[in-house]
Image: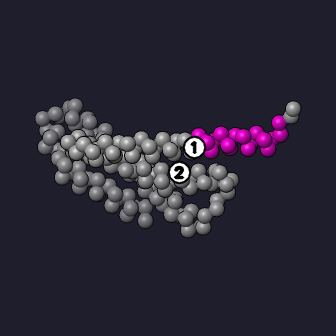
Amino acid sequence: MEISEYDLVTHGSLAYTMFFALVFLLVIAVNVILLIIFIRNPVLISPSQLLYINLSCSNITLALFAMTFGVVTLISNKWIFPGLVCHLVGFFNNCFIHMVMFTAFHVLNERYHYRMNSRRHSKLYTTKRIGINIAVFWIVCLCYLS
């Protein structure tokens, strides 16, 4: 039995599409579970946990705005949405990817200060300051990319 080049491409793209859809579902599920845990247990919410909540929200929005269109495009094998959606998807992809990077950097920075300057950590990382930082991150991402 001979396998044509078309069959290889079809089976390869099918496997890739299924893997991409699985990753999409896992990203949504894990981050929604994390948010549910924090919502049901407000005692767990500390200033540093706000960063994880923001990271989780960024991951969910990235998955919804980026991966949804990617999965649909892979399944249909073509871009079926209007041209404006293409531009919006690109804009939001960049915005949310930058948001994930900013938040991940802030988490690393916060963890560093926690380990190295544990006395000053509680003064540097208050709920108000982290909330302001998160708001500034979102504003910078939206303004920088527009």
Residue 2 painted magenta = no
Q: Element under label 2? A: helix
Tell me if mark 1 has few (under 14), some (14-19) or many (20+) residues whose alpha carbon lies within 10 angstroms of its own.
Answer: some
Q: Which mark, residue 67?
A: 2
Q: Residue at x 43, y 65 (%)?
A: 146
Q: Can residue 137 be seen here? A: yes
In the displayed structure image, the side of residue 116 where residue 33 appears, left or right = right
Front residue of 128 and 115: 128
Q: Where's residue 95, x and y in %?
A: 43, 56
Instruction: Spot the residue most to the right.
Output: 1
Q: Are marks 1 and 2 in contact (CB under 8 Å)?
A: yes
Helix, strand or loop: magenta stretch: helix
Where, by quadrant of the figure, is residue 78 drawn? Answer: bottom right
| Amino acid found under the numbered disc labelled 2 | Met
Where, by quadrant of the figure, is residue 87 drawn? Answer: bottom right
How far apart are labels 1 and 2 at the CA level? 8 Å
Q: Which residue is mark 1?
A: 20
Q: Residue at x 48, y 54 (%)?
A: 64
Protein image colouring: one colour
Tell me if mark 2 has few (under 14), some (14-19) or many (20+) residues whose alpha carbon lies within 10 angstroms of its own.
Answer: many
Magenta span of residues? 3-19
Front residue of 93 and 76: 76
